[in-house]
Amino acid sequence: MSVSRTQQHVPGQPSDLSDDAARAATETGTDRVSTLQTVVALTLLVAFVISLILLARMRDDPHWDRLVYLLSGFEAIVFAAVGAFFGVTVQRGAVSAARREADTAHRHAAALAAELAQHRAALEQARQDATGGRALAAAALAPTAAADRGTDRLAELTRLALALFPHQRPTD
């Protein structure tokens, strides 16, 4: 079953369920599984202990070898179930820690993205200022037609500087 592009959850974007609601639904489901796993593991351990006690009482039975053989198979099943139970419990802790780290990383990435946007805006402003500075320098270094145009030239350069750098107007 494929998921369309509009149905995929993108971190940092709103989804149908909030992150807290999705996490609560997942944890509720795992609580049920955890309870069932605990009951099964404890039941198997109790059954194993009972079978050990019965086997100890039946030491004089002529079918002792068969009983020990059956006990070893049952022992493997019990140890596998208990190992799976403890493995899932340990893994659940690792998964919750990984989720917390992922949440922290998402918040950090969002902060860095906002900082990057600010730096890009500052870079664009610096580029515009550099372009304006080059234009102003070219206008200032351009040869003048007559020496008497000195005051007109200064007024023209001032207007050009104010037009190129409106954010740096002198305060009166």
Image (tube, rainbow, N blue to C red):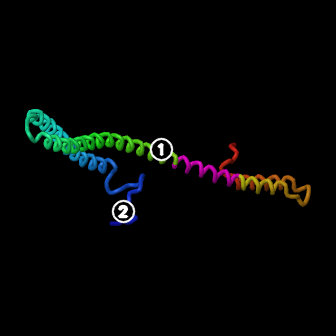
Percent position of residue 133, x then y: 75, 52
Per the image, the residue denoted by label 2 is 7
SS under mark 1: helix
Percent position of residue 158, x then y: 76, 52
Q: Which mark is residue 141?
A: none
Residue 42 versus residue 36: which sits nearer the camera? Answer: 42
Is 6 on the left or on the right of 117, as rendered? left
SS under mark 2: loop
Q: Are marks 2 and 1 in contact (CB under 8 Å)?
A: no
The magenta region covers 113-129
Q: Residues within 10 Å of mark 1 (few under 14, many from 20)?
A: few
Specify whether residue 39 is painted magenta. Answer: no
Q: Residues within 10 Å of mark 2 (few under 14, many from 20)?
A: few
Residue found 35% across the figure and 44% down from its top: 95
Magenta portion: prevailing SS class:
helix
Per the image, the residue denoted by label 1 is 108
Residue found 59% across the figure and 51% down from its top: 120
Counting labels gives: 2
Q: Quadrant of the C terminus?
A: top right
